[in-house]
Amino acid sequence: DEPLYRYEGDALPTQAGWLAANACDGACVQSVEDGHFVTTYPIGGDPHNFDRVISRAPDLPPPTLWVEWGFRSTQRMPRTAYTCDAYFSVNYRAVRQDVYILGDAIVNGSGDFFVLGLDIDEFHTYRFESPDGLNYWFSVDGLIFMDRQANPGLGSNYLQFGGQSGCGPAYHPKINEWDFIRYGTISYGD
């Protein structure tokens, strides 16, 4: 039978259940505009992040999971690094993976999977999906760009969305914007 994707909810980083690990402190400005979480970096500065906890140890996370979000940025892929715009970090059951997101690119943590040439300063839809807590894939605008099996790991289960500044004055001012974050579970029905 085909998998069924059960929709469970939306969540914005400023709503209940989201934690601001460290907010902007002079280097950036955060706001909610038309339901979007917006971060503006006028001059660069320190990293900041915000995260959504699926489940805290020793609780078990759901056996299957998908997460989908929209993101846009005015930051192009830097020539020297890909870690200075935004990221999505997964620590879910056996899955341990990071992806780095820019306005025109997305790169996995080890740098061997990537998509370049996205339209700059436009919303793109990103999706993480794990049908069993072990196998997983990431997609951008419906295109799967990495697909693999995880290595079992230890620790609490969480998803973390992050924004980072500090790429130097050549890459500022810069805007990051999260349009939506949806999540649900996968089941196999008849």
Image (cartoon, rainbow, N blue to C red):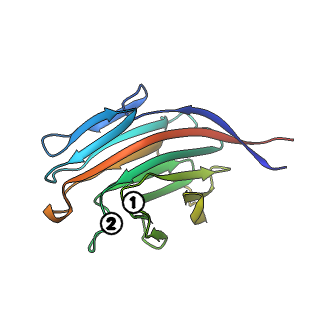
Seen at 29% across and 38% down, the residue is 21
Horizontal arrangement in the rendering, residue 62 relative to residue 68 (left or right): right
Q: Residue 143: x, y in percent? A: 59, 62
The answer to whether 119 is drawn above or below residue 42 in the figure is below
Q: CA distance from mark 2 to mark 1?
A: 7 Å
Q: Which residue is mark 2?
A: 82
Q: Residue 161: x, y in percent? A: 39, 46
The answer to whether 174 is drawn above or below residue 24 in the figure is below
Seen at 28% across and 60% down, the residue is 84
Q: SS at mark 1?
A: strand
Residue 78 image-quadrant placement: bottom left
Q: Residue 179: x, y in percent? A: 43, 42
Callout 1 amino acid? Tyr
Q: SS at mark 2?
A: loop
Q: Residue 145: x, y in percent? A: 55, 66
User: On the rendered image, what quadrant is the C terminus found in?
Assistant: top right
The answer to whether 14 is drawn above or below residue 120 in the figure is above
- Label 2, residues with CA under 10 Å away: few <14, some 14-19, many ≥20: many
Seen at 39% across and 60% down, the residue is 100
Q: Which residue is mark 1?
A: 100
Residue 104 image-quadrant placement: bottom left
Callout 2 amino acid? Tyr
Q: Which one is nearer the viewer's eye here, 111 or 141?
A: 141
The reply to whether callout 2 and callout 1 are in contact (CB within 8 Å) is yes
Disc assigned to residue 139: none
**Disc on the earlier residue, 2 or 1:** 2
